[in-house]
Image (cartoon, helix red, strand yellow):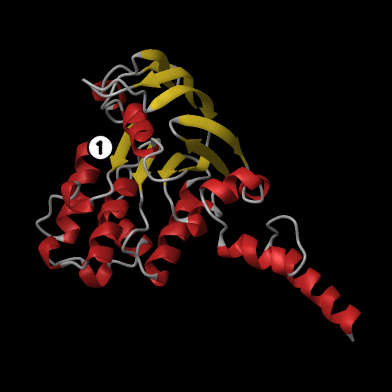
């Protein structure tokens, strides 16, 4: 478990706190940190990674207080929003192999290539990859590390629908045993998370399940209304539902109008 206790942080020579008294517990599964641009999502990820140290409060990862990134070595891996600063190449296959070797991972490279549908790109130079392909490689390499905690900053930027579904499928599978923490403004991605932390102006405003938070007035006013919520509201639902529940609700509407 990751535990944050009264965490405050501001950058050097700044008078403004960008993280303000955040207390939270993050367990196994997928947790999405969302909020308006500039709300502190990336900063919070970097604090958990150990790149920054809180001026007040503390952060624990599996019971160990984190004061620098060396405290997280072998346990936490951080994928920045720019995947090109994360991958080293020279090819897709070699990049994944280096991560597996570095972390002494239980995976082999072919497992990861198959998991992310990257077989056809295995021998391609990383500078030849599209933005979406490069981002998927970065995420594949992160998973290949077999780290207990995976931190991702805006992982779906540049991904088309097909790549996004590959990513979500893998994260859902891995989230059963790992802590996956994602900073994102992609409401489609956040809606598939197990839990959401809503941060506004550096403060943790609320946390909970997507189906609980997405309908709140503050979330819609500050972050926006997702297509899922908009559609559910349109058909008379007051919460996000499963595909089966939605189908049953739509059938009931049809029956009433017949």
Q: Could you tell me which residue is drawn at 77 percent across and 65 percent down?
A: 236
Residue found at the far bottom of this picture: 258
Residue 162 versus residue 241: which sits nearer the camera? 241
Residue 69 versus residue 52: which sits nearer the camera? 52
User: Picture quarter containing residue 118?
Assistant: bottom left
Q: Could you tell me which residue is drawn at 48 percent across and 29 percent down?
A: 203
* Percent of width and height locating residue 71: 29, 20
> What residue does disc 1 label?
103
Residue 111 versus residue 249: which sits nearer the camera? 249
* Percent of width and height locating residue 69: 26, 25
* Percent of width and height locating residue 58: 41, 15
Q: Secondary structure at mark 1?
A: helix
Q: Could you tell me which residue is drawn at 17 percent across and 52 percent down?
A: 84
Above or below residue 52? Residue 174 is below
- Along the horizontal axis of the image, is 163 left or right of 141? right
* Percent of width and height locating residue 141: 27, 50
User: Picture quarter containing residue 76?
Assistant: top left
């Amino acid at each position: 478990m990751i535990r944050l206790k009264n965490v405050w942080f501001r950058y050097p020579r700044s008078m403004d706190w960008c993280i303000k008294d955040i207390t939270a517990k993050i367990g196994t599964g997928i947790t999405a940190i969302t909020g308006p641009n500039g709300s502190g999502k990336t900063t919070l990820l970097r604090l958990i990674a150990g790149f920054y140290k809180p001026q007040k409060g503390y952060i624990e990862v599996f019971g160990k207080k984190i004061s620098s990134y060396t405290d997280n070595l072998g346990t936490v891996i951080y994928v920045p929003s720019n995947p090109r600063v994360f991958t080293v190449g020279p090819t897709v296959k070699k990049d994944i192999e280096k991560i597996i070797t570095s972390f002494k991972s239980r995976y082999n490279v072919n497992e990861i290539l198959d998991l992310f549908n990257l077989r056809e790109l295995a021998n391609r130079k990383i500078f030849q990859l599209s933005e979406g392909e490069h981002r998927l490689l970065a995420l594949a390499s992160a998973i290949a590390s077999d780290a207990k905690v995976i931190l991702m900053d805006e992982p779906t930027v540049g991904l088309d629908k097909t790549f996004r579904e590959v990513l979500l499928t893998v994260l859902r599978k891995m989230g059963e045993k790992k802590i996956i923490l994602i900073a994102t403004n992609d409401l489609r991605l956040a809606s598939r998370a197990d839990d959401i932390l809503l941060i506004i102006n550096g403060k943790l405003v609320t946390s909970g399940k997507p189906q609980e938070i997405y309908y709140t007035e503050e979330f819609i006013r500050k972050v926006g209304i997702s297509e899922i919520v908009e559609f559910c509201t349109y058909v008379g639902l007051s919460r996000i539902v499963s595909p089966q529940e939605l189908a049953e609700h739509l059938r009931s509407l049809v029956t009433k109008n017949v």
